[in-house]
Amino acid sequence: MRILEARFHSRRGPDYAVVGYLRWRGHRDLEPPVIEVSASLGSTARAQLLSKLQYLVRLTSPGSYERLQNLHSEFWSFVDAWSAARAERR
């Protein structure tokens, strides 16, 4: 399974908000990822950020797993959450 954590970076400061997780079930991204939106986002922000996240997934498909990680954006970043979680367990 491959998982990316989607982060939104505000202009207001160095912090970011975790928008959610993108999960690919297989090793190849022939299918679009399942998007799990963070419960910590407010309803208005959730709708707006989810819409933009879905757009970015469509824009980078096929190959969105790799392409999102390499996306050059002032506001968005995507981190391999699966590898990070495995490293923490060691």
Image (cartoon, rainbow, N blue to C red):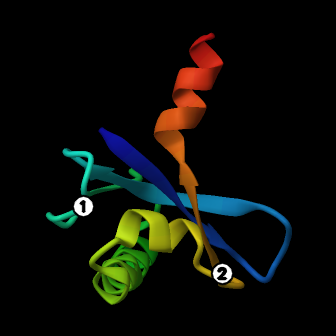
- Residue under circle 1? 29
Name the front one of labels 1 and 2: 1
Residue located 63% across and 10% down the image = 90
Please, what is the three-letter code of the amino acid marked with disc 2?
Answer: Phe
| Residue 45 visible here | yes
- Residue 60 position, x and y percent, is 37, 82
Graded by Cα atoms within 10 Å as few (under 14), some (14 to 19) or many (20 or more), the crowding at tag 2 reads few
The residue sitting at the front extreme is 28
State yes or no: discs 1 and 2 in contact (Cβ < 8 Å): no
Residue located 81% across and 79% down the image = 12
Please, what is the three-letter code of the amino acid marked with disc 1?
Answer: Asp
Q: Which residue is more in the foreground, 39 or 50?
A: 50
Element class at badge 2: loop
Viewed as shown, does residue 52 lie left or right of 68?
left
Viewed as shown, does residue 47 lie left or right of 33?
right
Q: Which mark is residue 77?
A: none
Q: Which residue is more in the foreground, 23 or 65?
A: 65
| Residue 40 visible here | no
- Residue 61 position, x and y percent, is 29, 80
- Residue 34 position, x and y percent, is 22, 57
The residue sitting at the top extreme is 90
Residue located 71% across and 84% down the image = 74
Viewed as shown, does residue 72 lie left or right of 69?
right
Q: Looking at the picture, does residue 43 appear above or below residue 61?
A: above
Instruction: Place residue 8 in its image quadrant.
Output: bottom right
- Residue under circle 2? 75
